[in-house]
Amino acid sequence: MLKQSLQQKLGLRINPLQIQLVKLLELPTYQLEQRVKEELEANPLLEEGEEQVTEELDAREEQEENDEKTDDDEFSLEDYINDDDEIPGYRLSTSNTSKDDSPRDFVLPGDTSFREKLLAQLGVQHLEEEERELAEYLIGDIDDDGYLRRSVENIVDDIAFASETVLPGEKVLDMLRVIQQFDPPGVGARDLRECLVLQLKRKLDTDPAPVTRHALALLEGCFEDFSRKRYERIARRLHLTEAELKEAIEEIKKLNPKPGEGNSDSTRAASEKIIPDFNLDIVDGELQLTLNAGDVPTLRINRSYLELLEKYRNGYPEQQQKEAAAFVKYKLSAARSFIEAVEQRNHTLMATMTAIVQFQKAFFLTGEENRLRPMILKDISKLTGLDISTVSRVSNSKHVQTWFGIYSLKQFFSGSMTTSSGEEIRTGEVKNAMMDLLDNEDKRKPLTDDEIGELLNARGYPIARRTIAKYRQLLDIPVARLRREV
């Protein structure tokens, strides 16, 4: 039996403004510029320029806000629903585009892509049509770093499934060898060893120097020992002196392990320039913090649309005018929300960075890293009253320009540890001490984690071996065996 009842519940709801603010907080300045441009294109009620303050327009906006809050609004959505029982398409869409907008494709100029370069080289090869199609298929399977990581058997099976043509594996290998002659050297390799060997063979054709032959023999016959840095075993097997082995290793280090890197589209897209989000200067002995707005324009509401809405309000609009009024009101609400979100973002960024500067004032005044205090997200959260997750979003991907260099905000956050003398220090100081030991170690006999621990304990840093291993991995430092040199 169905019953109706009233219930009270506690729940969390995030309004659209909060969602938009969270997304904007994560954006650094150069990405915010693009986001604002996109919003300007999508919302006709937004325009660039300083807000024009007049009593008449302010009263009109205030009347608009009051009307939006009343249930008997003349132009409420309920009124439009009742008219012909038809809802315009833009009210059903979650996007910021109107139904009158038509999709347009914009062709942007750009450099030739990595695969286009390979296909251009394929075009000058004298091949049968079937061979050319197979080569194009193989180029399509090459990863952005220049490797073909799919097995020949899988490629043969895919071609057989797609075209019902069974090709011998040797024919696929023949076409792969053709591609491996293309530039950049090493492209089309199936593993690191083959990639390096292809580059050395290409160089050997023009420079048959002994060091090139030694390096090629090392990779072809002793690659496993080379990867594990068993240099004495390599020297005995190839009958090389210590000097010859060292020259061969240096020759290998000059090779490119990722021939596609720097040519692929994803690599170009991933390369990002650093634009500081804050500027910190010293003026009359005091720190002065400013927010770098970059090329982000000042936003305001387009007044012509407000006047249009006022015109519809004072008359007796027809159905088409009612739909236009609803569209303007929807875009007006979105525009105000976006402007408010951008203002809140800037306020939150300034509040967070001001707290960081206050906490690390000694460092920013001197520029000496040993003046950095141990600081975690919770410390800044207490100073600002913001949630820890908000502080984390603000500090992520943001940079500050100081009088002594550019720093990532993440660099100022680190844990702490207590030395043998009872002094509290940053974990970054321990990492710097460890890096100092590794920079000055004997590369013929690198320090093990246990030996690093003993030396750090002698300096007054009581630290466990597992912590050393953790810091070494964070600093991207290999184990002692892989740091060994000839």
Image (cartoon, rainbow, N blue to C red):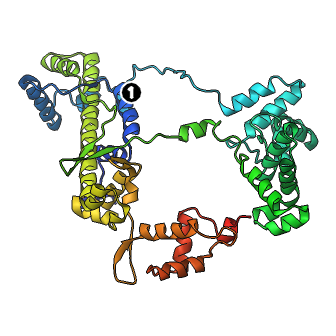
Residue 61 on image: x %, y %? 14, 29
- From the viewer's perspective, tell me whether residue 261 is left or right of residue 226: left
At horizontal 15% and vertical 34% (from top left) the residue drawn is: 65
Q: Quadrant of the C terminus?
A: bottom right
Query: Given the current orientation, which residue lies at the most extreme left position?
Result: 55
At horizontal 27% and vertical 54% (from top left) the residue drawn is: 352
- At label 1, counting other C-alpha atoms closer than 10 Å, the crowd grade (few under 14, some 14-19, many 20 or more) is some
- The residue labelled by disc 1 is 97
The answer to whether residue 449 of the structure is visible from this angle is yes
Where residue 119 sits, quadrant-wise, is top right
Q: Quadrant of the N terminus?
A: bottom left
Residue 187 on image: x %, y %? 76, 40
Seen in the picture, residue 119 relative to 480 is either above or below; the reply is: above
The answer to whether residue 94 of the structure is visible from this angle is no
Where residue 24 sits, quadrant-wise, is top left
At horizontal 81% and vertical 63% (from top left) the residue drawn is: 242
